[in-house]
Image (cartoon, helix red, strand yellow):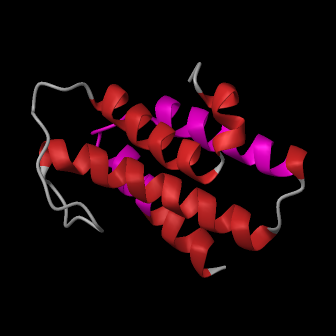
Amino acid sequence: MKNVIVLSLIGLICIGSGILKADEVTEWNTAVLDMIKADGISNHFGNRSTAMLHIAIYDAVNSIHGTYEPFLSIYKAGTSLPDQAVAAGAAFEVISNLYPQKIDLFQPL
């Protein structure tokens, strides 16, 4: 339950602040949840994976704008980078490292 609250807050911060459109976050979230359900991954690992996904997206986009306190990120990204590209890059990096056997599933995103 705690994970759901944290993920909801991260999503609201990213979406509510107008920094990132919900489409990119929703697309990655849906793809990961579909993969978790299809593969029968346990709730523990599924929750951990989605938490890591959303924290990576949050920190990546926040590294451009610097509006909020980062969770893990310690560097700034260039301000000319598009939010959607940075979010997709962070999401792909996390998920492809957690599930390398599923890399083909996430490359089109």
Magenta highlight on residue 20: yes
Q: Residue furthest top?
A: 108
Q: Quadrant of the N terminus?
A: bottom right
Residue 37 shown left or right of residue 83 in the figure:
right
Front-most of residues 18 and 91: 91
Which residue is depicted at the point 19% across and 26% down? 81
Q: Position of residue 26 (x, y in %)?
A: 57, 38
Q: Quadrant of the C terminus?
A: top right
Q: Which residues are magenta?
A: 10-37
Which residue is depicted at the point 16% across and 42% down? 64
The answer to whether one can see residue 21 in this image is no
Front-most of residues 23 and 97: 97
Q: Residue furthest bottom?
A: 2
The answer to whether one can see residue 61 in this image is yes
Front-most of residues 82 and 105: 105
Q: Position of residue 49 (x, y in %)?
A: 61, 59
Which residue is depicted at the point 29% across and 31% down? 83
Main secondary structure along the magenta-highlighted residues: helix
Magenta highlight on residue 44: no
Q: Position of residue 19 (x, y in %)?
A: 27, 39
The picture quadrant where one finds residue 15 is top left
Residue 61 shown left or right of residue 32 in the figure:
left
Which residue is depicted at the point 14% across and 41% down? 77
The picture quadrant where one finds residue 41 is bottom right
Does 69 sit above or below residue 86? below
Residue 18 shown left or right of residue 27 in the figure:
left
